[in-house]
Amino acid sequence: MRLIGFSTGALARGDFRRALDILHRRNLRAVELSALRFDELEPLVDALPDLDLHAFDFVSVHAPSRFAPNLETTVLSLLHRVARFGLPIMVHPDVIYNAEKWQSLGNNLLIENMDKRKPIGRTRHELEPIFDALPAARFCFDIGHVRQVDPTMTEAVLMLRAFGDRLGEVHISEVNTASRHDPISLNAVHAFSAVAARIPETVPIILETLLDQGQSDIDAEITRARQALTIPQNAFHVRRPVPTP
Amino acid sequence: MPQSADSVSYIDQLQTKLNRQWTAIQKARLDSGTRRTELRKIFSLRNSPDTSLVVFGSVARAEVTGSSDLDWILLVDASALPEHKAQELSIQGTLADKKLIKPGKSGVFGKMVGSHDLVHEIGGEDDLNSNTTRRVLLLLESLPVDGIETYRRVRRQILRRYFDDDRGLFYGSGDVRIPRFMLNDFTRYWRTVTVDFVYKQVADRDQKWALRNAKLRMSRKLVFASGLLQCFFCHLDPKADEARRALRTKDNSVLTEYFETELSMPPLETLAKACLIRNVKPETASNIFDNYDRFLAILDDEPKRDDLEPAQSHDALRSSAAWREVSEVSRPFHRGLVSLFLRDDNELRDLTMEYGIF
């Protein structure tokens, strides 16, 4: 059975402790600690040694999605502190200003494919030079982003064909035309299921559906994510599990 | 993003190989480049998500001549908004201000078009003539002025419909993989054009008969030939090897990407590619390209075009030197195509016999 959890930012924006409480109470065993805003990173890194994460089988950290180039060194030094805990770090490719500096994160670094608003990282072709520059980096496959860019899911298949052997985490939600993370619709379930067999069952699934304003609820989103990513019997493209680093 | 197939000029390579100078084709390519740049500049401030201003015809085929008109649609792939109508009117107004020649009266172009029918109405009673035309031409001769993401998204959706619904691609018993559903749609479009040509003789009281006839014999036929070749390349082109391998595992994503790239080539480039990569005799290639070059020269010659424009019948054309020239180029061009598909190359002949006729 797939390991499915939540991004803390989706459950309680800016309050990872409260989000962790919610997940504990639900007995969910995968979490992505969100520091999407630059100001959230340092408090999160400072709190890491004391956070009770033992109940989780999978923990990752999402790096800030926007900061100025002059803050790259600061961000990287904080992320190196995260890497010391052995945690995977999700990064948006458009904040990798100097790829050489990010190489030292090795395979702790996971590059995420982008939504249509971003100028890079949206397609396999746009991701190729990024992985070329960061050969040890792994892949965070955002299935909602790729569907927003290409509803036929052709791009999703092409990405998984190209980078499936680097796959370390999947983000799932419905990404609407304004690029907000909405509850997963039935159309999305249908579209996502087309690539389910290409995602090994061992890869953790992180829900990014925003629930902070009662848009949906945890159980409904987990049910839909599970439904979307169930590997059909006799599927052609079942990918072997990727060894964890 | 797929690498643009445009970047390789097969026409230039063929011209060198045959030691020819196709000056009218070269001029049309340059003029098309200028027209495309001009259009992109005119509409550079048009920033409208989920829409794309798409042009068809000579601009897309890289065959612009002096009096080329401008066929366009505002492609909408989004929720319906009142602003889309305002955009349509604004495009019409801008093009009129710039004195760019309006599309014909058929109603196929010069308006906003939603993506739903293009993608979902392939075949069946609701696949109107105009819908088929837009869909097929969106694949075979179109160019986005802006909104390239929307344009790509819709084209990809259409391709996926053709491939997802084509069981022969996945379950065919032999080794040959031809996108037959798409091929049949291309063929249907071409036959519709030929039937409508006769219909318009009556409906339009033969207005523009000669020009329409000339285009039918040359540019319309060229577009169909290029579509047929693209379908056959799925089996013959070494660049499609990976796509064919992926089909064996029920994966048509690579094929979709292959066609997106290849269909971005203007039709003449596709024909030049066939002449280069297949066993095509030099005289066949010359018959096609020498005569197409002369055809574009006729269209680019104002007096000759003026001579053709008002002619409404064979009788009216008997004294027309321009029409005689059109006849002189269209026959060897046709013979060239027949040789390309049915005589020179055994595999192309076999595919044409197997898939192109019945």
Image (cartoon, coloured by chain):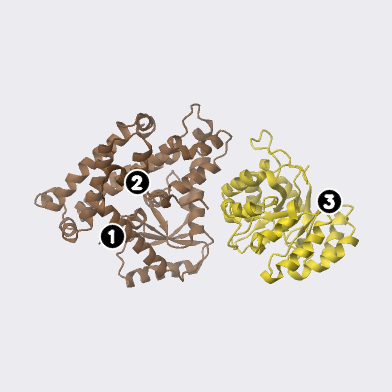
Chain colours: A yellow, B brown
* Side of B347 relative to B315 (left or right): right
Q: Residue at point 44% right, 43% down?
A: B124
Q: Amino acid at mark 2?
A: Gln
Q: Looking at this view, is B255 or B312 the one in front? A: B255
Dot in front, 2 or 1: 2
> What chain does mark 2 sit on?
B
Residue B122, given in percent of the width and then of the height, sits at 45, 45
Helix, strand, or loop for circle 1? Answer: loop
Q: Amino acid at mark 3?
A: Arg
Helix, strand, or loop for circle 3? Answer: loop
Question: Do the numbered discs 2 and 3 sit on residues whose CB atoms are within 8 Å?
Answer: no
Question: Do the numbered discs 1 and 3 sit on residues whose CB atoms are within 8 Å?
Answer: no
* Side of A55 relative to A87 (left or right): right
Q: Which residue is mark 1?
A: B68
Q: Looking at this view, is A143 or B25 the one in front? A: B25
> What chain does mark 1 sit on?
B
* Disc marking residue B273: none
**How many numbered discs, if any?**
3
Q: Looking at this view, is B231 or B313 the one in front? A: B231
* Side of B147 relative to B356 (left or right): right
* Disc marking residue A29: 3
Dot in front, 2 or 3: 2
Point out the residue furthest to the bottom here: B97
Above or below: residue B236 compared with residue A108 = above
Q: Residues within 10 Å of mark 1 (few under 14, many from 20)?
A: some
Residue B315, given in percent of the width and then of the height, sits at 11, 49
Q: CA distance from mark 2 to mark 1?
A: 27 Å
